[in-house]
Amino acid sequence: MRKLTNRILIISSGFLILTIGISYFLYNLSETNYLGCATEIPQNFCGTVSPSLSENATEGKKIFNINCAACHKLDKKMTGPALRGINNKGEFPYENYVFDFITKEDSLNKINDKYTKILNEEYNYDFNHNFTMTKTEFEYLMDYVK
Ligand code: HEC
């Protein structure tokens, strides 16, 4: 009779330990695999585009990715020059030069603008920027590349 009680005791404590072990394992599993809104990985999980960009800059990023990213990066020269901080470079011929360059490079070429000419010679790539873009879209874009 004592032997049987002992055996039941051993088996049930074994069972108990096993249950605790499995629960702990499952608990850990759910901890690591569950992605809530506050989790960092993956980024953009809850519909954010990029947490550090303002609304306007996010619009600018869209415009950039659609129209410019094929040839430009922000921080690295590609087909065209790196565009980070482009509007603050302060070496352009006049104030709205960057807007004019992006929307009507043709006309800058036509009037033989010196800066445009030098830039075109430097890059030697046959592409003229004649994008249709409103001032607002331009501002968004500059917000993104600033
Ligand atoms: C097909 C390639 C291509 C695309 C697309 C393109 N660029 Fe360019 N970009 C160039 C090249 C090449 C240059 C160098 C000058 C030149 O050849 O016109 C340049 C020059 C520039 C410059 C002058 C930089 C400086 O140092 O003065 C600006 C500003 C610029 N691009 C903005 C843009 C923006 C904004 C877009 C998108 C709306 C865009 N580019 C799309 C190729 C491209």
Image (spheres, rainbow, N blue to C red):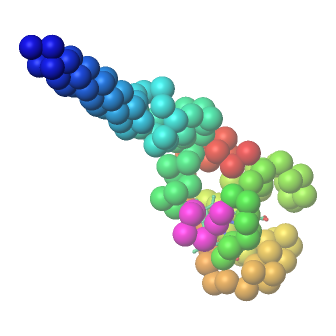
Q: Quadrant of the C terminus?
A: top right
Q: Quadrant of the N terminus?
A: top left
**Range drawn in magenta:** 68-73
From what the image shows, is residue 56 above or below residue 102? above
Q: Residue at x 52, y 51 (%)?
A: 63
Image-quadrant location for residue 14: top left
From the top left corner, tell me how far across and down residue 127 is, in percent: 61, 78
Task: From the viewer's perspective, tell me whether residue 26 is left or right of residue 7.
Answer: right
Residue 4 visible within the image: yes
Residue reaching furthest right?
91
Q: Nearer the viewer, residue 30 or 78?
A: 30
Task: From the viewer's perspective, tell me whether residue 34 is left or right of residue 137.
Answer: left
From the top left corner, tell me how far across and down residue 111 is, in percent: 77, 72
From the top left corner, tell me how far across and down residue 80 is, in percent: 69, 72
The prevailing secondary structure element of the residues shown in magenta is loop
Task: From the viewer's perspective, tell me whether residue 52 is left or right of residue 3.
Answer: right
Q: Nearer the viewer, residue 69 or 128?
A: 69
